[in-house]
Image (tube, rainbow, N blue to C red):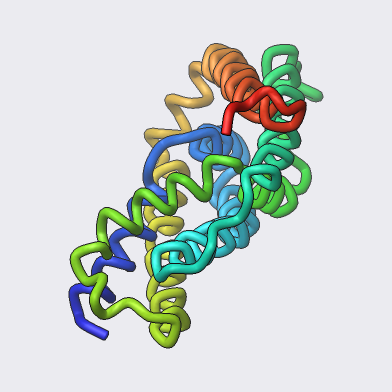
Amino acid sequence: MTQSLVFGAFLAALFYVLIPGPAFLQLLGIGAGQGRKAGAFFMMGHLVGDLIWSSLALIAIVGAKTIGTFVFDLLGLACGFYLAWIGWSAVNAKPKAEGQALVVVERPFRRGLIFGVTNPKGYPVALATFTALVAGSAGALDFEALPMLLCVSFVGFVAADIILIGIIGAGAVRRFYRAHERLIVRCSGVLFMGFAAQALWHATPGLIGWRKA
């Protein structure tokens, strides 16, 4: 295994987490509204999904058969309804008590776990990211290298999580979020419903047999 392959896997994992998406928006709301501890629990749960999708991506890159589209269509459907529920809850959110955050996630670890595992974009994004950064060392890729690559990827995921938790828990970020919380939460809710519509739009044709082969 070459150093460039190891470094490429680390960077791929780092960028995979840092690329903005639904999970980033959710982390911003949880971390800025409830603090670094809640944000950290969310990211720990999300890490499970990161490891699953990166493992599948690396297996596919090495040469194994990829999972059929039906599995991802089911995940897309589940994710679509889940994101729609979160979006609707955000748009209609009201503080439970004076001075309390507008949206409070009582179980951030569980929220992160569901987000990570049911994200239908996790696999293609991981596949694209890892392919771009490890393809140059394709000659050194084999199944014996997978355990080490996954360990290196885990380090990259944790490094990215630490960076994000540090950012969303910063005083300036929290002050800005709380000063504009209502607007940010409402706009995030609309975006979540947009993500939900997109997930359902892509998943439904395959499940009802309308997608062309």
200, above or below 140, in the image: above
| 190 lies left or right of 97 | left
- The residue sitting at 46% across, 70% down in the picture is 154
| 7 lies left or right of 175 | left
Q: Residue furthest front?
A: 213
- The residue sitting at 27% across, 64% down in the picture is 134
Which quadrant is the N terminus positioned in? bottom left
- The residue sitting at 69% across, 43% down in the picture is 70
86, above or below 50, in the image: above
- The residue sitting at 74% across, 51% down in the picture is 110
Judge whether residue 106 can be spotted in this image.
yes
Q: Give whichever of 161, 16 is nearer the camera.
A: 16
Residue 96: percent from the left, percent from the top?
A: 80, 24
Q: Quadrant of residue 207?
A: top right
Q: Give whichever of 24, 116 is nearer the camera.
A: 116
Q: Give whichever of 181, 141 is nearer the camera.
A: 141
Judge whether residue 37 can be spotted in this image.
no
206, above or below 114, in the image: above
Which quadrant is the C terminus positioned in? top right
Residue 162: percent from the left, percent from the top?
A: 42, 58
Number of marks present in the image shown: 0
| 172 lies left or right of 77 | left
Residue 98: percent from the left, percent from the top?
A: 74, 21
Residue 195: percent from the left, percent from the top?
A: 58, 24
